[in-house]
Amino acid sequence: MKQKKTVRTGIVGAGFSATFHFEALEKVYRTNVEVVGVFAANREQAAAYAQKRGIRDFECLEALLDAVDVVHVCVPPMFHEPIAVAALARDKFVVCEKPLTGYFGDGSPDFHWDRADKRVALESALASVERILAAERKSKGRLLYAENWVHAPSIQKEREILEKTGGQILWIHGEEAHSGSHSVDYAYAARCGGGVLIGKGCHPLSAALYLKRVEGRARDGRPIRPRTVSARTHAITRLPTFRDAGHIRKDYYDIDDFSMMHVEFDDGTIATIFASDIVLGGIHNWLEVCANNHRTICNINPNTAMQTYNPREEYFKDIYVVEKIGTKQGWASTSPDEDWFTGYPQEMEAFYRTIAYGQAPESDSLLAADSISTIYSAYLSASRGGTAVEVRTFEGGPGEAAPAKAT
């Protein structure tokens, strides 16, 4: 049995995603992951995070980077690029939360997503992608895209099916939805790069892009990439006619809370991706694959691995049931291990096999780049009433990633 390698790791950010990254890192078993410390702009939050976990609280990003081999970027998307570029410049590996990057406004205090030029948004987002890929080309490190849907057990089982049967995916249909994010920043496009289309749509979209890459490589030796996208977005809870019953978040400043993307791939097949913040009953994450030789429904969350009936709310007051559920009373799809079903521990295990042992990653910078390009092309399409927009893709891998080109 090979001796495990030890990898020194640091976390940037001390909020929600930093918490589940740390928990997933504790479950990595083929690599000794030494979480050295944390840096966060909110010094009080960083100190509390470090103290709770017995790690060091670094006063600046540079000091953290000097002490680690890997950095986890767990901050709002507007800060992803500068942190990733700084880490890659020091030859560090980067595990970057989704979305990779984006467009975060023009800097004006009255910036509003409804009035933003979506062509400018697309060009700015792609320029940011190119800067990140350029930094990766020059680095001994790599950027690993923390899209947990890619590593969810059901998605990885579909990967196996595609690779072993040579199936052709004809249509992918997917969705992420719930009743609204808990994040204060999420209400503002200038902080998160847009609304629900990017914030939730990135998950099923990235899984769909990933599976078409898998299909193409397995059968023809090259990935199948997105060619065009058409989309519509809506801000339902900002409508003057919206009737608030108290169950759905409605305090968004300028973001969309419903979106639909129709993606056409370069082989002519399609995917339809829905994302919304107007769905009650808990988080709704699923992906359906209709292929020429099989059909798969990936019920990521909820699923029926466990179901409970609770006649009184108070019985389950100290029991976690499932994410975003509005009540614990009645029947529920109680998840025995929600993180496992959504792919968080598998994602980290895979990343550290890449970092420590050189295993090829399933979720890399080019998948992240295609996701961002498709998303902002979708926003441009929505601004034009749903007209199809060509998606620019990126070629090459680490050390050879090329500028974007039209497909």
Image (spheres, rainbow, N blue to C red):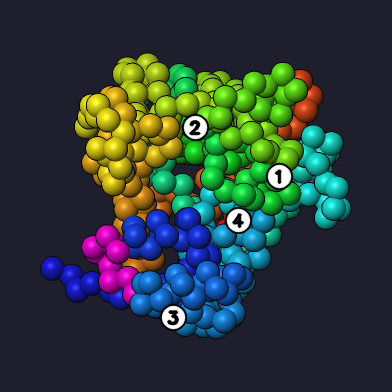
Q: Which mark is residue 56?
A: 3
Q: Which residue is mark 1?
A: 189
Q: Residue shown at 57%/74% (left/top)?
A: 43
Question: Which of marks 4 and 1 precedes in the sequence?
Answer: 4
Image coordinates for residue 88, horizontal then vertical, percent: 57, 69
Q: Does residue 32 belong to the magenta stretch? A: yes
Report the magenta stretch's main SS. Answer: loop
Vertical relation: 58 (above or below) 274? below
Q: Name the amino acid type tagged 4.
A: Pro
- The answer to which quarter of the image holds residue 292 is top left
Image coordinates for residue 406, horizontal then vertical, percent: 69, 37
Using the numbered discs, state the Cα–Cα distance from disc 1 to disc 3 in whole angstroms: 33 Å
Q: Which residue is mark 2?
A: 178
- Could you tell me if residue 7 is visible in this image? no
Q: Name the amino acid type tagged 2.
A: His
Using the numbered discs, state the Cα–Cα distance from disc 2 to disc 4 in whole angstroms: 20 Å
Vertical relation: 236 (above or below) 108? above
